[in-house]
Image (cartoon, grey):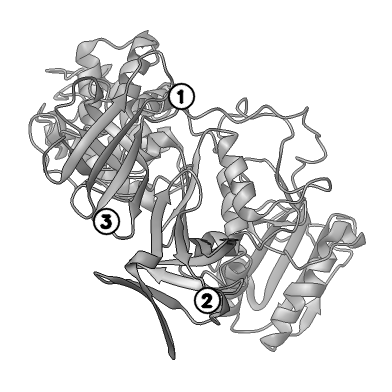
């Protein structure tokens, strides 16, 4: 269906499509647009249409798309009462997500988190919504807007989004005794030192494991104190030695920068290093394993600094967290459910947010949203802000405020942060939850909310050991689970694995001109000593070799099609896919260094 543009002039509203312009006088039309993180963004028109010209217009149908103010909407509802016709359009991406209704089930695991499952549901729509990207909280720390990198100085970098002194979550964590150094509550000096060390890491965009490593390092080396001396010529919070070409300046920011520069580079080169290995790669200590004993404590410290109070609900990193068998679902035999409904329910279960702004689908917690740089500063009577009202009660878990302002001045996208000033009890950081404007008015009514606390993952049923059994050929770490196989029908052959080959992998390879050279066989052990998926005794596995002397591009393309974008030649890495309600581990091998220069090996095991 051709896109129709909604154009607002001074005295009329125009609906403009190829070969057609439909005009309505201002007196005939009322309308409003609402952008929200609480549900679908909508555009509503009420038209006085006594001659039913609007209803008979050819663009009014169940896939009528409308563009207004750079956003696209799709007709969702038509109501008529007398001469008044009410048209409700919703965000076009939401409307498309509503069309995906087949039942989907995935078992929660270390790789299939709540965020991963939601991402897999949204990924089904990528052909219709190729520009839609997904931003989630769990293991994907991507706020709506990043704070600008700050210049490192000899005093604390002012990152008000984080900390133990300025961030509410950090303050609460300190009061609860969650920030400790070698098992004892951190004192004021230690808190400020840890804060400064972490501030530098954030300004350098270090990932979380590097931040944890920095905390574990200063804990082991100096008990989080900026020492004047130490072993031989060591000094400072990292106990650096000037004789070893370290700054060793006792300027925390300068010394921390030197540590992070090496740690970030080493982490990039060795992403699977444990905390103690990463710390040792920088420090070169005589006690290389000593840092690991503080890793769990450092994790809690970083969590408190980030203002979270607890780890992300969607990431099952602690074996005790979210333990037991638990299924993520879209729909059930008793209740149909579409992707938009399912992702909203999955967010509500842990008090996260699910919303779309522009070309981005967010599945994210409020703590993460609140870390973004403020988009607007709201002061009553200043900068286009007309009125500001609020209801703040220290006993309520969530407070609200509203203000009326000129669009484009102090009105930002929902999901962004607003800072309220000169308002007494309402001063501080707020989350923009939604705003509504009349189509004919320059003003918008904006609703602000205080952040809600995320809930932990629900407890599962007692785990079924057979469900969590590892497959028989585990060469390399498993990677992230992804959406795959929505059009594959499983059967009982080799626990469903052969069906994936018959219906997808082999047709893909034959399309490249690669013949089948080997399938199941009697050989049990691989060249690396593992149990082969080719072995006939591996009843939950199936494997095929496809002959080619130039297979790298095809192997990478196959991995990408199955949702795994980190595939590399000469690697034994595996990844997980979901087909129906079953999870499978996949290994795709090609490369001379691993003796696969003349064929692509694809092995799939049900897990």
Residue at 84 percent of width and 54 percent of height: 540
Judged from the image, the secondary structure of the residue bearing numbered disc 2 is loop
Residue at 52 percent of width and 76 percent of height: 51
Look at the picture and state if 218 lies above or below 494. Answer: above
Which residue in the protein does label 3 denote?
Answer: 441
Q: Is residue 52 left or right of 266 when viewed as pictured?
A: right
Q: CA distance from mark 2 to mark 3?
A: 27 Å
Which residue in the protein does label 2 denote?
Answer: 51
Look at the picture and state if 368 lies above or below 422. Answer: below
Q: CA distance from mark 1 to mark 2?
A: 71 Å
Q: Is residue 392 left or right of 489 when viewed as pictured?
A: left
Q: Do the residues under discs 1 and 2 have CB atoms within 8 angstroms?
A: no
For the residues carrying marks 2 and 3, which lies nearer the camera in this image? 2
**Place of residue 300 in the rendered image (x, y in percent of width and height, measured from the top left):** 42, 23
Q: CA distance from mark 3 to mark 1?
A: 54 Å
Residue 448: name its quadrant. top left
Looking at the rendered structure, which numbered label has been put on residue 296? 1
* Quadrant in the picture for the N terminus: bottom right
Q: Is residue 228 left or right of 220 when viewed as pictured?
A: left
- Counting labels gives 3
**Place of residue 109 in the rendered image (x, y in percent of width and height, measured from the top left):** 66, 41
Residue at 58 percent of width and 65 percent of height: 96
For the residues carrying marks 3 and 1, which lies nearer the camera in this image? 3
Q: Do the residues under discs 2 and 3 have CB atoms within 8 angstroms?
A: no
**Place of residue 422 in the rendered image (x, y in percent of width and height, measured from the top left):** 14, 27
**Place of residue 417 in the rendered image (x, y in percent of width and height, measured from the top left):** 29, 40
Q: Is residue 515 visible?
A: yes
Q: Who comes first in sequence, dot 3 or dot 1?
A: 1
Look at the picture and state if 369 lies above or below 407. Answer: above
Judged from the image, the secondary structure of the residue bearing numbered disc 3 is loop
Depth check: 220 or 159 in front?
159
Q: Do the residues under discs 3 and 1 have CB atoms within 8 angstroms?
A: no
């Amino acid at each position: 269906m051709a896109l129709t543009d909604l154009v607002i002039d001074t005295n009329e509203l125009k609906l403009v499509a190829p070969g057609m312009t439909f005009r309505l006088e201002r007196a005939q039309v009322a309308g409003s647009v609402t952008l929200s993180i609480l549900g679908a963004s909508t555009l509503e028109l009420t038209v006085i249409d006594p001659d039913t010209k609007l209803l008979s217009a050819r663009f009014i149908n169940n896939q009528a798309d409308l563009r207004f103010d750079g956003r696209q909407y799709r007709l969702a509802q038509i109501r008529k009462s007398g001469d008044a016709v009410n048209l409700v359009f919703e965000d076009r991406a939401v409307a498309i997500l509503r069309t995906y209704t087949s039942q989907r089930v995935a078992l929660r695991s270390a790789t299939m988190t709540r965020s991963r499952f939601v991402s897999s549901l949204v990924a089904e729509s990528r052909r219709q919504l190729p520009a839609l990207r997904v931003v989630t909280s769990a293991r994907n720390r991507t706020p709506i807007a990043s704070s600008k990198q700050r210049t490192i100085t000899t005093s604390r970098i002012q990152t008000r989004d984080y900390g133990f002194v300025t961030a509410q979550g950090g303050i609460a964590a300190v009061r609860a005794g969650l920030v400790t150094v070698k098992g004892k509550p951190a004192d004021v000096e230690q808190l400020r030192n840890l804060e400064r060390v972490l501030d530098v890491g954030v300004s350098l965009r270090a990932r979380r494991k590097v931040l944890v490593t920095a905390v574990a390092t200063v804990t082991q080396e100096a008990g989080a104190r900026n020492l004047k001396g130490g072993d031989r010529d060591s000094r400072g919070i990292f106990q650096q030695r000037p004789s070893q070409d370290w700054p060793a300046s006792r300027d925390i920011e300068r010394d921390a920068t030197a540590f992070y520069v090496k740690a970030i580079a080493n982490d990039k080169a060795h992403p699977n290093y444990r905390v103690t290995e990463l710390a040792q790669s920088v420090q070169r200590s005589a006690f290389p394993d000593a840092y690991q004993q503080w890793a769990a404590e450092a994790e809690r410290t970083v969590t408190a600094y980030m203002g979270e109070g607890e780890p992300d609900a969607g990431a099952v990193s602690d074996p005790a967290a979210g333990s037991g068998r638990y299924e993520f679902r879209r729909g059930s035999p008793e209740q149909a459910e579409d992707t938009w409904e399912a992702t909203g329910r999955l967010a509500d279960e842990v008090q996260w947010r699910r919303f779309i702004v522009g070309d981005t689908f967010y599945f994210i917690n409020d703590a993460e949203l609140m870390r973004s740089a403020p988009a607007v500063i709201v002061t009553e009577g200043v900068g286009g802000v007309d009125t500001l009202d609020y209801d703040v009660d220290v006993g309520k878990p969530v407070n609200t405020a509203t203000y009326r302002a000129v669009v484009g001045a102090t009105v930002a996208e929902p999901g962004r942060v607003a800072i309220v000033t000169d308002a007494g009890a309402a001063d501080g950081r707020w989350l923009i939850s939604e705003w509504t404007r009349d189509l004919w008015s320059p003003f918008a009514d904006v609703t602000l909310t205080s952040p809600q606390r995320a809930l932990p993952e629900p407890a599962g049923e007692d785990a079924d050991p057979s469900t969590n059994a590892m497959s028989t050929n585990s060469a390399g770490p498993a990677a992230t689970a992804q959406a795959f196989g929505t059009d594959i029908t499983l059967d009982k052959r080799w626990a469903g694995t052969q069906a994936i080959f018959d219906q997808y992998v082999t047709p893909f390879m034959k399309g490249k001109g690669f013949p089948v050279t080997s399938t199941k066989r009697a050989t049990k052990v691989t060249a690396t000593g593992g149990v082969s998926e080719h072995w006939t005794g591996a009843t939950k596995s199936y494997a095929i070799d496809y002959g080619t002397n130039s297979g790298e591009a095809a192997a990478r393309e196959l991995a990408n099609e199955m949702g795994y974008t980190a595939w590399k030649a000469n690697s034994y890495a595996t990844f997980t896919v979901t087909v129906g309600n079953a999870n499978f581990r996949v290994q795709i091998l090609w490369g001379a260094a691993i003796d696969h220069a003349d064929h692509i090996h694809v092995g799939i095991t049900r897990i």
